[in-house]
Image (spheres, helix red, strand yellow):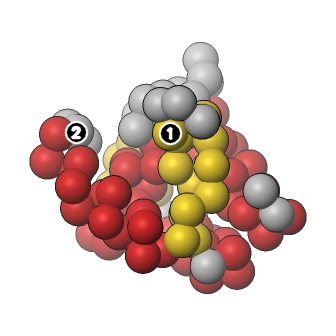
Amino acid sequence: MDAAAQQLANYMNELALLAYPAGRLQHLEFVLWHAVVVGPFQYGRLSLTQEHIKRLRELSYSCNGWIYRDPIEGEIWVSLTQWQDIYSRKIDLISL
C-alpha cells in the first residue's frame, strides 16, 4: 500500500475508533463509503459530518482508490472502479 492509500486507511481507522472505541468494526469501508454517497449520519458515537466526508473524498481521490478489508488478504487498496463493483455487489448483504 503506498503512502496516500495508507493515509486513507489510517483516517478510516481513526473514525472507527471514534465511533466504537473498542476497535475496528466489520464492514467499516462500506459504512464510510455509504456516508460518502449518502451524506452525514450517526455512526456509533460519532456523527459523521460533511468535514469527515470531505476528508474521506480527498484521501480517496489522492490515492485513486479505497481501502477494502479482504477476507483473505486483510486491509488492501483497491481502485475506485474495483471498489464500486465490490460495494454494489455486497451492500445489500450488509446492514448499516
Q: Residue furthest left?
A: 92
- Residue at 82 percent of width and 63 percent of height: 2
- Label 1 sits on a secondary structure element that is strand
Quarter of the rendering containing residue 74: top right
Tell whether 74 sits left or right of 92: right
Q: Amino acid at mark 2?
A: Ile
Point out the frontmost of discs 2 and 1: 1
Report the front residue among 7 and 51: 7
Instruction: Name the spot of residue 65 as percent of width and height, x first.
Output: 57, 71
Q: Residue furthest top?
A: 22
C-alpha distance separating marks 2 and 1: 15 Å
Q: Is residue 15 above or below residue 51?
A: above
Residue 84, image x and y in percent?
35, 69
- According to the picture, the residue beneath numbered tag 2 turns out to be 94
* Vertical relation: 92 (above or below) 65: above
Label 2 residue SS: loop
Sequence-first tag of 2 and 1: 1
Check if mark 2's residue and mark 1's residue have beta carbons within 8 Å.
Answer: no
Residue 73 left/right relative to 43? right
Residue at image location 31% in from the left, 65% down from the top? 85
The C terminus: image quadrant: top left
Q: Report x, y in % for residue 34.
A: 33, 60
Specify the amino acid type for callout 1.
Asp
Residue at 42% in and 64% down: 83
Q: Is residue 42 above or below residue 52?
A: above
Residue at 37% x, 50% y is 30
Residue 55 marker: none
Counting from the top left corner in percent of width and height, residue 24 is at 57, 29
The residue under label 1 is 70
